Amino acid sequence: MGSFQYLFLALTTLFSLFFIQCSPSPIIQAAIYKDKNSNNAYYNCTRNITFATNNSYPSNIKTLLDWLSSNGTNNARSYLTTVATKNTTVYGMFNCLRDISTDTCQACVTESAKLISSLCSTAKEAIIWYKVCLVRYSDRRFFSTMEESPKISFMDKQDYTGGRVERFNNIVWDTLNDLRSEAANASTKLAHKVVEITKKQKLYGAAWCVSYLSAENCGWCLSDAIADVPTSCCRGKTGGRIYFPSCGVRFELYPFSFTKEDTVSWMPPPPESPHPPLSPLPGRRKQKTVTIFVIVVPVVFTLVLLVLGYYRFLYRKEGKNHHDILKESFGHGHDISNLESLQFELAIIEVATNRFATENMIGKGGFGEVYKGTLSDGQEIAVKRLTRSSGQGVAEFKNEVQVIAKLQHRNLVRLLGFCLEGEEKILIYEYVPNKSLDYFLFDHQKRKLLPWPQRQGIIKGIARGILYLHEDSRLKIIHRDLKPSNVLLDSNMNPKISDFGMARIIAADETEESTCRIVGTYGYISPEYAMHGQFSVKSDVFSFGVMILEIISGKRKGSSSELGCLDDIRRHAWTKWTEQRPLELVDPNIEGSYSREDVIRCIHIGLLCVQEDPNDRPTMATIVFYLNSPSINLPSPNEPPYFKRSRTGENIATNMESSNIGDSINGISLTKFFPR
């Protein structure tokens, strides 16, 4: 692009902006404005029209807003209504964002209706957030739909200084995710929580959804709102708020109000106003236009030329910018703007890891090394640096960025970002201090640090994480490489599933897919996947079942005390089960007391997961239900398949030994082992 083209583009852009400012309707779609007369009102007006004299839509809006105001006393949480005359229909609602009194809700709705009537007098669609409620109307039926635009977000100006920032961020993250689940499943679609950070400091959090959302859509909406907290809003800040039309979350270090007396100030004037410009005052539009033209335009014009010249210099120097690199690496079919927000500069990573110093290396795998690092704000990170010569690892790198960047759950490791510069391909995760599950489980001394309550908690945490992948996230994801080395343990020994390089996203209505490339680890991959390349959510269930048996026994899959024996953990567990001696499977290194019924139930669930026919295996939702419902009797498991070890080592199992044993002889339920 030549200099003349740059100049022409700059002039075109500036004059376009100028004429937009001079137009009669200055409100821009998706921009959020603040009412000049209120510190608590933020609104959005879209699709402005000039109403014909015979158009009944304006009067329908007035009627609807009157109905919303008068019905504030009938429902302290929400109200939906429709007004239709002739060929025009307007849909409206109010939703109170807190568990408040009827009088407080009505007062907020009444004032909101007045404000939106004056602020959006010519809009077909409008929304206002005011104090403890939101009011919305539209000419389209938005009831039951989940919407995330327009959004409003604030963050406190102050950085957290009360201790380790990483620990604070993790507390915020876990609290908001807990609130997500609570709000989605609550009848009121409201949840609030207080968490102790230190003896003198507490975190206050809240989450809400509009009442008409299903539990699933509420969970999705809140997941997306929470995902903005560390990426585009409030990372390391003492407080923050993200509100969509359908849901919202908030956290603070002070108790924002739950009572009528405090509602006037529950949404105080934010330290930083929203990013879009404030709505201009109609009476001074002409004067502002002259000011913009005389003063602002020349300054902006000069700045644009300087910026264009600078970026042109960089383009010549480096050849490609970050956006071009992302498009080249990930393809045009992906949302590059979301990926850009996760990019780290290589210089930042080098400083954090002391230029990948050997003493900072905490792990090494087939695709590269993992280093511990510390960012400038004190947050500890784990840096996975891809080996430059690893051609196979490039595909896994791209896949992991695209998959895990969309996932947010307390039992999944959190991807903070990535780096693509030159030949460097780097993934940056939250730092999880206790390494991986296999580090403890298969070490004779360290496994003593895993008493039964800890092991049971790990089993349940892994199950919740897989359930999120399969059913609760907006994507349907099959991990395909679940094993103890891919389960990390945080400072409280809570499990976090990691390594999504081999994960696959499948359509929500699909049950299985096929592939010619079998990936995974020997002993954990299901028989239908190993033999025929068919994988599904039941493939992950099989892997999870193997892990359950390993966690209980402390034995690796395929391990045996007899040299050359084809025995594995599934056969060993099945033998003990059919001999009615299931407790002999339990790791003798487990210290402390434990419930025999709980252990046997987990063994039972593990055997249900590793059945040969995927249709016989329970879903993860059923497994989580089984784990949390000790009084429910479980179906009898069928004999699991057994694997021969592949000559190629740990990669996959290429041969399977068919069982010559007939139908399972085990018709004994859990209650018959140990009557209650």
Image (cartoon, rainbow, N blue to C red):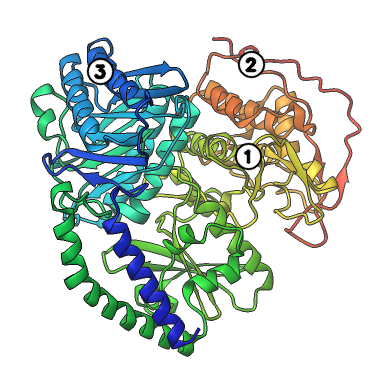
- Residue ID at (48%, 31%): 217
Give the number of the disc on residue 544: 1
- Residue ID at (23%, 18%): 69
Q: CA distance from mark 2 to mark 3?
A: 66 Å
416 above or below 636? below
- Residue ID at (40%, 24%): 90
Q: Are marks 3 and 1 in contact (CB under 8 Å)?
A: no
260 above or below 426? above
Q: Which residue is mark 2?
A: 673
Q: Residues within 10 Å of mark 2 (few under 14, many from 20)?
A: some
Dividing the picture into quadrants, the one containing residue 567 is: top right
Viewer-side label of 3, 1:
3
Give the number of the disc on residue 66: 3
Residue in the foreground of this view, choosing between 58 and 111: 58
Nearer the N terminus, badge 3 or badge 1? 3
Q: Are marks 2 and 1 in contact (CB under 8 Å)?
A: no
